[in-house]
Image (tube, rainbow, N blue to C red):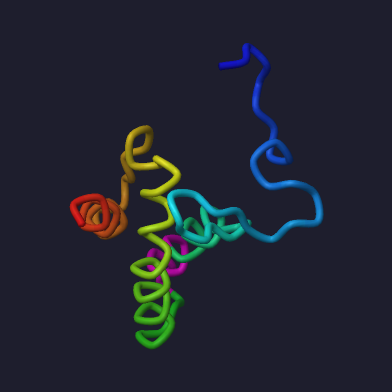
Amino acid sequence: MSNKAIQPEDIIADGADYILIQGQKIRKGSVAAFLANIAMLENPKSTAEERADALQAMKELAPSLVTVGLHHHVNFKNEVAEEIIQQAAEG
């Protein structure tokens, strides 16, 4: 392993939209999208439909976040988000 700090472009090259890790397509912006959906869940102005859409998106994104190892380094304060990640990690 290199002693050089890793930059975003070291993971997904400029101009690319995704990478394959363990046969899974990981899109650029997956972590940011998951976080934005947590914010939508927590926003008191979000409608029930918006919350349901955010929850579904989080469930779809969770396997990608587990593939990149986020669950080994992050514990979410939002209990719903943490449960979604843990369920994806289990399987």
Q: Quadrant of residue 7?
A: top right
Q: Percent from the top left, x then y, of residue 60?
A: 39, 70
Q: Is residue 42 magenta?
A: yes
Q: Is residue 35 left or right of residue 16?
A: left
Q: Is residue 9 above or below residue 65?
A: above
Tell me what residue is drawn at x 44 percent, y 78 percent.
Answer: 46
* Left or right of 68 in this view: 74: left
Q: Position of residue 82 (x, y in %)?
A: 27, 51
Q: Quadrant of residue 72?
A: top left
Position of 80 compared to 69: left or right?
A: left
Bounds of the magenta segment: 38-44
The answer to whether 8 is drawn above or below residue 55 in the figure is: above
Which residue: 64% across, 41% down? 11
Give the main secondary structure, helix, strand or loop, of the magenta stretch.
Answer: helix
The outermost residue toward the right is: 15
Residue, far front:
23
* Residue furthest top in the image: 3
x then y, percent, for residue 21: 49, 49
Residue at 58%, 60% in the rendered image = 27
27 or 25, nearer to the observer: 25
Of residues 91 and 20, the one nearer the viewer is: 20
Q: Quadrant of the N terminus?
A: top right
Q: Position of residue 10 (x, y in %)?
A: 70, 36
Query: How many dots with numbers?
Result: 0
Question: The C terminus lies in which quarter of the figure?
Answer: bottom left
